[in-house]
Image (cartoon, rainbow, N blue to C red):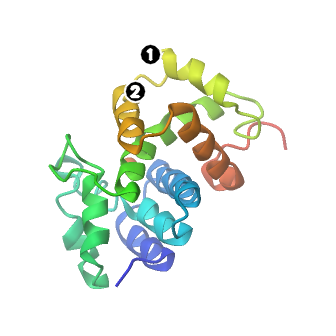
Amino acid sequence: MQITMDIARSAIKQNVQEEHLLRHAQAVSAAMEAMAGHFGENPDYWAAIGYVHDVDFERFPDEHCQHVRQLLEPYSLDEADLRAIESHGWGSCTDVEPISNLEKSLYTVDELTGIISAAALMRPTGISDLSVSSLKKKFKDRRFAAKCDRSLIQKGCEMLGMELAEVMQLCIDGMRPYHKELGLSGNAE
Ligand SMILES: [Fe+2]
């Protein structure tokens, strides 16, 4: 069956405990929801794929993406769902190339949400007024969030046929409503 948000939450609950990984799951889920809106696709489905994509990372950090099928076996998910999840590790831990817009989006926002979160964390106002232009400055500053792979994000945008700024805007807008869960509300109460 096609994955739902309930399934994604249940699978993550069983396999992930670390707070920063749960926030990452939520961030990617929110960004995928927004990307689905852009492509006129099902936002709940894309959000569920985003939420569950790192299901095997905490338990198998050295064999990331290799245990997706094993951990999701109880849910009898569609092959398309399993393939989409595996494809986000293309070039690093799998050879499953992102083909669909869902896969290309996941590949791109997985990394992009990291730099958005890092940029929002620096601001007293959190993500509430983070702009694309300010994010772009952080993107160009290679010392900022140095672990975020800019070339991967750019490659993802090329595969999508979209401008970086447009994907940035969609992801910021998508993540903003979830600022509380993401810990990106800023200092202001
Ligand atoms: Fe991820």
In front of the other: 103 or 184: 103
Q: On screen, 144 above or below 186?
A: above
Determine crowd level at label 2: few under 14, some 14-19, many 20+ residues with C-alpha closer than 10 A: some
Looking at the image, residue 180 sits to the left or right of residue 82; the answer is right
- Front-most of 162 and 140? 162
Q: Amino acid at mark 1?
A: Arg
x%, y% of residue 135? 61, 27
Q: Label 1, on which residue?
A: 142
Residue 84 numbered mark, or none = none
User: As drawn, is 154 to the left or to the right of 65?
Assistant: right
Residue drawn 55% across the image and 60% down it: 33
**Quick check: 184 above or below 120?**
below
Q: Residue at x 47, y 65 (%)?
A: 46
Asked if the residues shown at circle 2 and circle 1 are in contact, with their CB atoms under 8 angstroms apart, the answer is yes
Q: Position of residue 67 (x, y in %)?
A: 19, 63
Identify whether 61 is placed above or below 45. above
Report whether the residue tagged 1 is closer than 8 Å to ligand 1: no
Residue at 34 percent of width and 58 percent of height: 100
For the residues labelled 2 and 1, the Cα–Cα distance comes to 8 Å
Viewer-closest of 159 and 46:
159
- Report which residue position mark 2 lands on: 150
**Residue with the most extreme right position:** 189
Quick check: 147 left or right of 35? left
Residue at the location (74% across, 38% down)?
186
